Image (cartoon, rainbow, N blue to C red):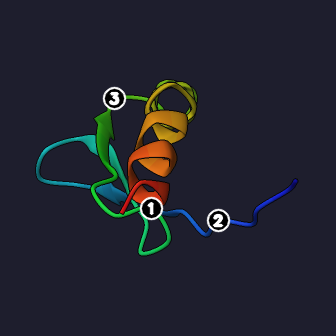
Amino acid sequence: MTTSIQIDARWDDDAHVWIATSADAPGLVVEAQSWRAMIDEVRAVLPDLLELASMR
């Protein structure tokens, strides 16, 4: 099964990091110094967050 999830990513000029959040994945808040690192971190934590959300 495929699920579409919208990830909102933005660059924080003050902190010099990318920040990713998602209303589709409650609890997703990732910070990383590069775009690639942010994507990798989202991919690492997203499955666990979605599993936790499905248990509710």
Q: Nearer the viewer, mark 2 or mark 3?
A: 2
Residue in view at x 55 percent, y 25 percent: 40
> Is 18 situated above or below 37?
below
Quadrant for residue 48, please give it.
Answer: top left
**Please, which residue is most extreme toward the front here?**
55
Q: Distance between the residues labelled 3 and 1?
A: 21 Å
Query: Up-down: is 30 above or below 32?
Result: below
Q: Position of residue 31 (x, y in %)?
A: 28, 39
Q: Going by the picture, which residue comes out furthest to the right?
A: 1
In depth, the one of 9 and 3 nearer the eye is 3
Rendered location of residue 24, percent (x, y) = 50, 71
**Residue position marked by numbered label 1 in the rendering:** 25
Q: Determine whether the residue tagged by mark 1 lies in a helix, strand or loop.
A: loop
Give the left or right position of residue 4, taking residue 36 as reference. Answer: right
Q: Which sits earlier in the primary sequence, circle 3 or circle 1? A: 1
Give me the C-alpha separation between circle 2 and circle 3.
22 Å
- Could you say whether the residue bearing mark 3 is in a helix, strand or loop? loop
Mark before the other along the chain sequence, 1 or 2: 2
Q: Identify the residue under disc 2.
A: 5
Looking at the image, residue 6 lies above or below residue 38 = below
Q: Which residue is identified by label 3?
A: 33
Kindly report the distance in space between the C-alpha atoms of the residues bearing marks 1 and 2: 7 Å
**SS at circle 2:** loop
Rendered image quadrant of residue 55: bottom left
User: Mark 2 Cα within 10 Å, few/some/many (few <14, many 20+)?
Assistant: few
Q: Which of marks 3 and 1 is in front?
A: 1
| 31 sits left or right of 48 in the view | left
Q: Tag count in the figure? A: 3
Residue lying furthest left: 14
The one nearer the camera, 6 or 52, is 52
Q: Which residue is drawn at 34% across and 64% down?
A: 26
Q: Which amino acid does label 1 sit on?
A: Ala
